[in-house]
């Protein structure tokens, strides 16, 4: 009895959905006719300028440089500034200074150490006199806000010049 009563109610409700829809169709057609979409025109395609690579005698930019070009040139016959290449390099000398971030400091008595974070998330403690960076960078001074570094840059003729760099505390 209950099932038949439910089926009758459902049939009555569904017959109410089959009514006249002419007013709805009229509304849709008038709305489509009145509304015009305002689409901005596309930007003009930039003109392609061909670059003819004419460096047949030079090294291809897609080939790695030869070992001689990447090795550090040391000329011991010259009396000029040169790094100590016999010194064992530290872990942070394999990172460029751009890939290191100063994250804080630690201090004990008169000594201040800098906390440096590498691009892979490791954190190291360094103090004055230790080396960092690709260019034999020696930490000259550590303050609570900055690290002052003196790097040795090759000049191509076998001698090296000093360059001052600094790193500031970042709180990212």
Image (cartoon, rainbow, N blue to C red):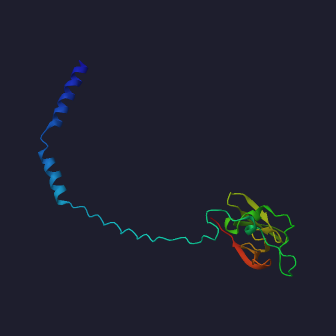
| Image x and y of residue 119, in percent | 67, 60
Q: Quadrant of the N terminus?
A: top left
Q: Residue furthest front?
A: 57
Q: Is residue 28 left or right of residue 62?
A: left
| Image x and y of residue 29, in percent | 16, 52
* Residue closer to the observer: 2 or 92: 92
Q: Is residue 39 left or right of residue 49?
A: left
| Image x and y of residue 115, in percent | 74, 64
Point 12% across, 48% down: residue: 23
* Residue closer to the observer: 70 or 22: 70
The answer to which quarter of the image holds residue 18 is top left
Please give the count of numbered marks on the rendered protein: 0
* Residue closer to the observer: 166 or 17: 166
| Image x and y of residue 21, in percent | 14, 43
Q: Is residue 164 visible?
A: yes
Q: Is residue 133 visible?
A: no
Point 61% across, 63% down: residue: 62
Q: Residue furthest bottom?
A: 79
* Residue closer to the observer: 10 or 26: 26
Q: Quadrant of the C terminus?
A: bottom right
Q: Is residue 35 left or right of residue 109?
A: left
The answer to which quarter of the image holds residue 47 is bottom left
Point 22% across, 29% down: residue: 10
């Amino acid at each position: 009895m209950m099932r038949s009563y439910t089926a009758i109610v459902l049939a009555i409700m569904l017959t109410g959905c089959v009514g006249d829809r002419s007013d709805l169709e009229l509304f849709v057609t008038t709305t489509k006719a009145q509304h015009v979409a305002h689409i901005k025109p596309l930007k003009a395609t930039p003109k392609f300028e061909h670059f003819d690579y004419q460096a047949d005698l030079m090294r291809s930019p897609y080939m790695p440089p030869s070992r001689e070009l990447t090795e550090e040139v040391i000329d011991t016959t010259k009396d000029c500034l040169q790094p100590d290449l016999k010194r064992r390099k530290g872990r942070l000398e394999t990172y460029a200074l751009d890939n290191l971030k100063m994250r804080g400091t630690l201090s004990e008595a008169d000594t201040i150490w800098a906390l440096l974070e590498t691009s892979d998330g490791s954190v190291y403690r360094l103090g004055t006199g230790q080396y960092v960076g690709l260019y034999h960078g020696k930490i000259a001074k550590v303050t609570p806000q900055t690290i002052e570094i003196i790097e040795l840059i090759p000049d191509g003729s076998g001698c090296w010049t000093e360059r001052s760099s600094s790193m500031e505390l970042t709180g990212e």
